[in-house]
Image: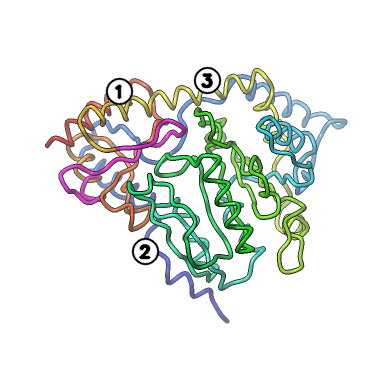
Amino acid sequence: MKLNENYRSLSRSYLFSEVEKRVGAFREMHPNQELIRLGIGDVTLPLAAPIVAALHDAVEEMKEKQTFRGYAPEHGYPFLRAAVRSHLEGYGAVLQEDEIFISSGAKDDLAGILSLFGAGNTVLIQDPVYPVYADTNILAGNRIVWMRAEPENDFLPMPPKDGGADLIYLCSPNNPTGRAYSRAQLEQWVQYAAACDAVLIFDAAYEAFIGQHGIPHSIYEIPGAQTCAIEIASFSKTAGFTGLRCGYTVVPRGLCRCGQNLNAMWERRKAVSTNGVAYVIQRAAQAVYTPPGWKAVQDAVSYYKKNAAVIASALQSAGIPCCGGVNSPYIWMKCPNGMTSWQFFDHLLQTAGVVGTPGSGFGSAGEGCFRLTGFGDAEKTRQAAVRLVQAAAL
């Protein structure tokens, strides 16, 4: 028997598992102390009423023989594929429904997409980064070339001047830094991918948080992207689906490499690996794109962004460098007093009862930085902002 030896190359503990381990130890020692969690990016607002209504209606259908649904189409029901297509067309992205594949969430497809590619590819990944990009490529046996995101490049690394790549990962708006690429910057990336004959994997999980003009919501707003890019997105943060699990991946029919069509490959992969996302979940996702559903979603996004703005304002008033929060629910801050990321995590937990995420867990370039989220309760976020500034001054 042979095992995947690449597992030996992974870090010993997944970032958020280590966070929970330390929080658990603190709770045992201080069972009565209230904690305010601004760490793991899970939503806290309930599902919007139009989405809940769609769930109820779909469940009612399931109890009648005439409207009962069994296995879902592995590529997604036509009604949801059409809704996603219409949504993206609203931003100027011209797609066909058979280029859109419904999934159980972005994380699943970020891992699964590598099944289209062989081992040993050269992969460009930003540092700091959402850990799944790196871990899945390590497991796949790929060579990672890190692109440092730092104040000198406004946390938005651009294509290298020398060397090529096979795969490129971009997340915009970004997790963890909260920064977002402009149209002109993404045009450069698309041109670079085309010149390298690379495939650009574009994570659009936070597109609903974009508020600034000139920030693309989809990579397919960029000319040429349909022959070099795959887009992966999620309803988790957009519409509070972290507990329902639904997303989509776009693989254009014009995307070909090594004599093969990646759309046809992905269609085949879905056919052999999934029985689709549940009907009731897909009806709920469809409701996101109805006028009342989208208004409710935007209200929730606004709530979270206001929380992020409260955190950013407190940090800026205290003279602590930070970015994010404008097009994103995330705030990326510099740890005070020269602390390492984990030192500040422990310090903030012990002195303020606030939980964040150490920047070093997102990569070596994140050392000395810290991520906070706007996904909490508004009042608790205001309390946390005060505690945060007080802890930073100690």
Horizontal placement of 20 versus 256: left or right?
left
Q: Residue at x 47, y 40 (%)?
A: 180
Label number found at residue 267: none
- Badge 1 is on which residue? 382
To which quarter of the image does residue 112 belong? bottom right
Q: Is residue 129 magenta?
A: no
When the figure is inspected, residue 39 is found, relative to residue 157, above or below; the finding is above
Q: Residue at x 74, y 39 (%)?
A: 94
Bin the neighbour count of mark 3 within 10 Å (Cα to Cα): few under 14, some 14-19, many 20 and up: few
- Badge 3 is on which residue? 299
Where does the magenta region start and end? Answer: 322-344
Mark whose residue sits in front, 1 or 2: 1
Contact (Cβ within 8 Å) of mark 1 with mark 2: no
Amino acid type shown at disc 3? Asp
Front residue (pair 136, 69): 136
Mark whose residue sits in front, 3 or 2: 3
Q: Residue furthest left?
A: 394
Bin the neighbour count of mark 2 within 10 Å (Cα to Cα): few under 14, some 14-19, many 20 and up: few
- Badge 2 is on which residue? 12
User: How is the rendered protein coloured?
Assistant: rainbow
Q: Secondary structure at mark 1?
A: helix
Q: Secondary structure at mark 3?
A: helix
Q: Quadrant of the C terminus?
A: top left
Amino acid type shown at disc 1? Arg
Q: Is residue 325 magenta?
A: yes
To which quarter of the image does residue 90 belong? top right
Amino acid type shown at disc 2? Arg
